[in-house]
Image: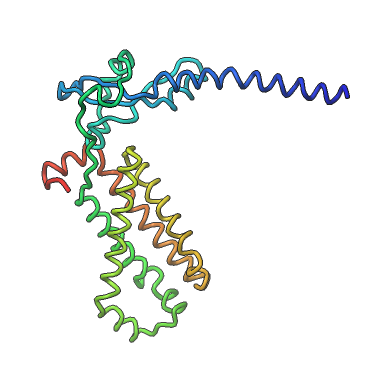
């Protein structure tokens, strides 16, 4: 009985120790989670921003919270700005919907990075299945003769299907980037890897019928191509996309 009572006291003590930081983090998150209206230092016009309340709450557990912006109505085009409006955002009170007239968040798709990424992914496929890498093993696992491969290369439909798949995947990564509103090279790689994993899981029943070597070859190719897509789309986001827009136009 005394042992059980001791365990209960220990559990209560641990709960109290964890409760205070949790309440402190909750207060920080609640204080800074609402959007605020500020004057953009670049355009001198009113924009809406949101402070990264989760980051502030987590860093606040170590002492002083660290503040940064997680959303702005000028993003994603200016996502890599200096965030000079952050002090004003911290001092301003949150606004309610309809209280402040703000421009809509721009979420257009830039087609040039998508086209470049799709071309790079299809080129990776050509190199991957070339005689310099895995063509011999790929043909052996499929049971294709050189004559059949030559005939297959002459057909248009396999190439068109590959290009279409690369384009759809690149647009999917771009959509994930827009939806997550966090841009950059590593964010692009993360988005493309997550989408690749989701597709692999969705097609897992059909993949189980492949031989082990063929599965490794195709999984390796699609993963490398997916990372390439993420690098291009993620690397061309932010300010690079603004340059792209001025040169080639919007999507």
| Residue that lies at the very extreme toward the front in this rendered image | 98
* Rendered residue at 45%/74% (across/down): 137
Q: Is residue 208 left or right of residue 235?
A: right
Q: Quadrant of residue 4?
A: top right
* Rendered residue at 47%/23% (across/down): 57
Residue 227 spot, x, y in % from top left? 37, 52
In the rendered view, tell whether residue 114 sits above or below residue 96. Answer: below
Residue 173 spot, x, y in % from top left? 33, 50
Q: Quadrant of residue 39?
A: top left
* Rendered residue at 33%/49% (across/down): 230
69 or 218: which is nearer to us?
69
Q: Quadrant of residue 55?
A: top left
Residue 62 spot, x, y in % from top left? 51, 19
* Rendered residue at 34%/37% (across/down): 182
In the rendered view, tell whether residue 1 sits above or below residue 127. Answer: above
215 or 140: which is nearer to us?
215
In the rendered view, tell whether residue 101 sits above or below residue 93. Answer: below
Residue 138 spot, x, y in % from top left? 42, 74
């Amino acid at each position: 009985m005394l042992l059980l009572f001791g365990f209960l006291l220990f559990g209560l003590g641990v709960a109290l120790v964890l409760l205070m930081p949790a309440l402190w983090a909750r207060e920080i998150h609640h204080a800074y989670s609402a959007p605020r209206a500020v004057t953009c230092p670049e355009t001198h016009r009113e924009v809406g921003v949101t402070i990264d309340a989760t980051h502030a709450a987590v860093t606040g557990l170590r002492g002083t919270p660290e503040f940064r912006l997680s959303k702005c109505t000028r993003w994603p085009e200016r996502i890599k700005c200096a965030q000079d409006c952050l002090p004003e955002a911290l001092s301003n009170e949150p606004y309610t919907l309809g209280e402040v007239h703000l421009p809509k968040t721009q979420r257009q798709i830039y087609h040039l990075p998508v086209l470049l990424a799709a071309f790079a992914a299809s080129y990776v496929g050509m190199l991957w299945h070339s005689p310099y890498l895995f063509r011999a093993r790929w043909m052996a696992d499929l049971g294709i003769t050189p004559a059949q491969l030559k005939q297959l290369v002459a057909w248009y439909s396999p190439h068109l299907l590959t290009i279409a798949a690369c384009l759809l995947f690149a647009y999917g990564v771009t959509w994930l980037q827009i939806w997550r509103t966090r841009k950059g090279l590593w964010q692009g790689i993360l988005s493309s890897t997550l989408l690749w994993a989701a597709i692999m899981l969705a097609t897992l029943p059909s993949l189980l019928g492949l031989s082990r070597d063929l599965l490794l070859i195709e999984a390796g190719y699609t993963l490398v191509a997916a990372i390439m897509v993420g690098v291009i789309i993620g690397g061309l986001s932010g300010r690079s996309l603004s340059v792209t827009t001025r040169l080639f136009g919007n999507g």
